[in-house]
Amino acid sequence: MKIAVFARHSLFTDGITSQLRARLALFEIHFVDADDVNAFEKIAEISPGIILVEMLSEFVSEDNISAKLLETFPQSVILQLDLNSAVVKIFSSEQRQVHQISDLITIIKDISPISREIINA
């Protein structure tokens, strides 16, 4: 699987990229400079399964960047990493059919361990 690291800061990129390469030898890790006007074209050439996005205060809205990436690359999962708060937001274009409330409950259980505990209580 290919992973594209979409970021601006070289220290972030160097550290994360080298750690990913060291620990995920079976993955192809590619850096894409977020300031490059051809960044989306480069991501398209890579065709990654995962796009790791550095959260930056300089972006107008990190969620908008991730949403635009997901819209442009629906086959990819977007992982938006905030090193300041040690949080990763996950964006996916996965869709599921919901015909009954039980279908919705199944989806909630699948994506949230906390919800599983509450619903099964």
Image: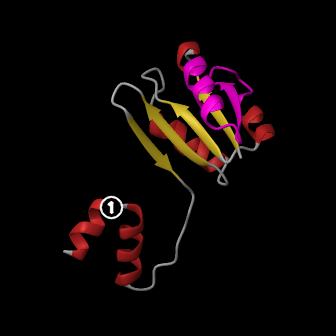
x, y percentage for residue 41?
77, 34
Q: How many marks?
A: 1
Q: Amino acid at mark 1?
A: Pro
x, y percentage for residue 42?
76, 32
Q: Which residues are magenta?
A: 13-39
The one nearer the camera, 19 or 115, is 19
Query: Which residue is labeled 1 in the image?
Result: 113
Q: SS of the residue at dot 1?
A: helix
Q: Determine the image quadrant of residue 20.
A: top right
Question: Relative to residue 99, is residue 47 depicted above or below?
Answer: above
Q: Determine the image quadrant of residue 39.
A: top right
Q: Is residue 26 magenta?
A: yes
Q: Determine the image quadrant of residue 117.
A: bottom left
**Rendered residue at 42%/71% (across/down):** 107
Residue 113 placement, left or right of 22? left
x, y percentage for residue 100?
39, 86
For the C terminus, the quadrant is bottom left
The one nearer the camera, 59 or 117, is 117
**Rendered residue at 56%/25% (across/down):** 16
Q: Furthest residue to the top?
A: 11
Q: Is residue 23 magenta?
A: yes
Question: Relative to residue 73, is residue 96 depicted above or below?
Answer: below
Residue 4 placement, left or right of 95? right
Residue 79 placement, left or right of 121? right
